[in-house]
Image (spheres, helix red, strand yellow):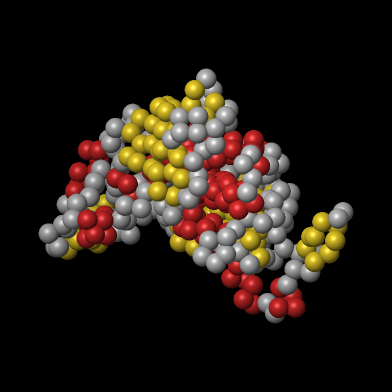
Amino acid sequence: MGSSFGKLFRLSTWGESHGGGVGVVVDGCPPRIPLAESDIQIDLDRRRPGQSEVTTPRKEADEAEILSGTFEGLTLGSPIAVLVRNKDARPEAYSEMSEKFRPSHADYTYQAKYGIRNWQGGGRSSARETIGRVAAAAIAKKVIAQCFSSDLEIVPFVESIGTIRANVDTATVTRDVVESNIVRTGDPNSVEEMIDKIKEIRGDGNSIGGVVGCVIRNVPVGLGMPVFDRLEADLAKAMLSLPATKGFEVGSGFAGTEMTGRDHNDPFRMVDGKVRTTSNRSGGVQGGISNGEDIVFRVAFKPTATIMTGQDTVTTDLEDTELKGRGRHDACVLPRAVPMVEAMAALVLVDHMLRQRALAGDSE
């Protein structure tokens, strides 16, 4: 079912939204990396439901249990299994969906492809699957810090919700600012307007989308493997594998199509003995390989598919009908999508760092 990701640092997620639990198996983590459940819990707390007034009211502690791959606080080099148990599942809220397909959700396509589906919260198509990714990324970030670069910094942030656009400077935005507000935007002046918009949309039984921006600083030169494993291509696949994503762009993105080469090119200069660029319209990647500048990209998230108003649909017997959303859902996925974007970025980076080390013939 395409539930695995990565080449040298490889993860496989498992579990359904309203089953006994969800989790991940990570294979390829180097040995002797300090790792405790508390390291994983920090990021799971940022992703979990019920964390604020603008997220789904489902109450889950999302407590991580490491089942294998560590001993006396260190990784062994063997597969690491992490389990998070579902404790507030309410599958009965989805009973109507057993016979009706939710518009713009995965119900119809899963049924058409496999001939069977878990209609309780969407099963594998639920964003609850991303728990495994976030847990794996917590491990990946430990590997990056210990084996490659303790200075590398991944800072995702909500750039827009609907038509509300935050004023965020990717050169200066900090994690502290992003995590200081419940919508996780990098612009404190946009917080209240964004909160009010989410509340308004939710009160109308509707949903809204937006854009998550991300900057990755202190990236080493040389990450990325031409031709098909270009760094931005792997980042694009990673981001577009997240639920509700509909677009990805790096650097100037689509706006670059309105520029000429003279305006778009990033001139080179020597600065303190290093090759640098005087602009960064490439977004830190040239020829599919990192050039040492900040990697800057954006991810578009559509409005949540499940809304609390009636919509036309069809039944599993292929008859026209109507369906009104049930259950507990985010009216806007953006605040909880921020740690998911960070997770996928970390997973791509650690995999390419390990591949670059292997290419260079380094054993440590």
Residue occupying the point 41% across, 38% down: 25
In terms of image quadrants, where is residue 225? bottom right
User: Where 186 falls versus 60 (above or below)?
Assistant: below
Q: Say how many tags the image has.
A: 0
Nearer to me, 313 or 36 = 36
Pick the front one: 274 or 253: 274
Residue at 29% of width from left, 45% of height from top?
123
Q: Could you tell me which residue is drawn at 57 percent across and 29 percent down?
A: 32
Q: Is residue 364 left or right of residue 265?
A: left
**Farthest residue in the left direction?**
317
Depth order, front residue of 296/332: 296
Which image quadrant for residue 22? top left
Q: Position of residue 95 (x, y in %)?
A: 20, 43
* Residue for point 43% across, 55% down: 241
Is 341 left, or right, of 154 in this rendering? left
Is residue 234 visible in this depiction of the protein? yes
Residue 321 rendering spot, x and y as whole percentages: 18, 60
Q: Answer left or right for 116 relative to 352.
A: left
Query: Percent x, y for residue 217?
Result: 69, 49
Instruction: Please identify the quadrant where the C terminus is shown.
Output: top right
Q: Position of residue 350 (x, y in %)?
A: 57, 46
Res. 214 visible in picture: no
**Seen from this angle, which residue lies furthest top?**
72
